[in-house]
Amino acid sequence: MIESFPFEITEYGPDGPRPVSIEAIREVPLTIYLNDREVVTLLCTGKYPKHLAVGFLKSDALLTDPSQLKDIDVRDEDGRITARVTVSHDPWELSLIHISQ
């Protein structure tokens, strides 16, 4: 996966504007699925999508213990990344119980 791309900008300095070529960070969409249900699409650099997917699910309390993880399948598909996470519990049921208390 390409991490950056060349980008032309105009730099303004004491001698006036001049064209400059820089490297811009590439952002790609990462769609996270949990037990075949789409949770979110984020923009990220594309580095460590597996870690980002698990961290996002943990921060949203959809994953509470590492032992709940059954599988993580990450694929780069035409400039998009998908992370399909399978867990051993029904996170939607647990979320509703937690919210209603």
Image (spheres, rainbow, N blue to C red):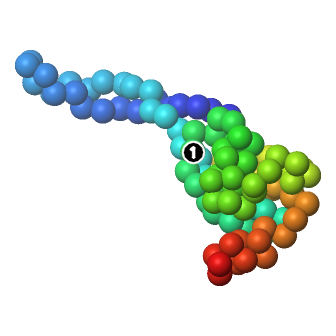
Q: Secondary structure at mark 1?
A: strand
Image quarter where the C terminus lies is bottom right
How far across and how far down the image is residue 67, in percent?
Answer: 88, 48
Q: Is residue 39 visible?
A: yes
Q: Is residue 76 visible?
A: no
Q: Nearer the viewer, residue 62 or 85?
A: 62
Total marks in image: 1
67 relative to 95 in the view: left or right: right
How far across and how far down the image is residue 79, in percent?
Answer: 66, 48
Identify the residue shown where x is 87% and y is 65%: 89
7 relative to 62 in the view: left or right: left
Identify the residue shown where x is 65% and y is 35%: 47
> Residue lying furthest front in this view?
101
- The amino acid sitting under disc 1 is Cys
Identify the residue shown where x is 24% and y is 31%: 10
Which residue position holds label 1?
44
Location of residue 11 with respect to 56 vertically, above or below: above
Identify the residue shown where x is 77% and y is 71%: 94
The quarter holding residue 2 reads top right
Q: Nearer the viewer, residue 80 or 36?
A: 36
